[in-house]
Amino acid sequence: MGTNGLLALGLGLAAFGSALGLGKAIEGAMTAMGRQPEAIGKIQTAMIIGSAFIEALTIYAFVSVFVLKG
């Protein structure tokens, strides 16, 4: 497997890990919203911020593939 293949594999693993993390985070937020409907605003805000950080890791991996290729 060449360098491009390894970079693609790394990006795929980063995306898969991000998807698992997002799934767990959203599952926890939905459960919390169901248990405490009065706190939906705070929970939703925290969930969106957390999701942005999780997704940023995938974007960093995506950008690093292009940096290392070029």
Image (tube, grey):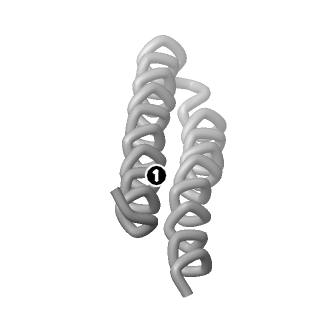
Q: Position of residue 70 (x, y in %)?
A: 56, 87
Check disc 1 and give the amino acid type. Gly
- Residue 62's x, y, as percent? 50, 68
Query: What crowding class fits label 1: few (fewer than 14 Cα within 10 Å), some (14-19), or many (20 or more)?
Result: some
Figure check: 57 above or below 24: below
Q: Which residue position holds label 1? A: 10
* Tag 1 secondary structure: helix
- Please state the total of marks drawn on the protein image: 1
Q: Of 43 and 10, which appears nearest the observer?
A: 10
Which residue is pictured at 60% across the width and 33% down the height? Answer: 43
| Rendered image quadrant of residue 20 | top left
Vertical placement of residue 22 versus 34, above or below: below
Q: Is residue 47 above or below residue 61?
A: above
User: Which quarter of the figure has residue 47?
Assistant: top right
Residue 12 vs residue 51, the one in the foreground:
12
Residue, x 56% and y 74% (percent of image)? 63
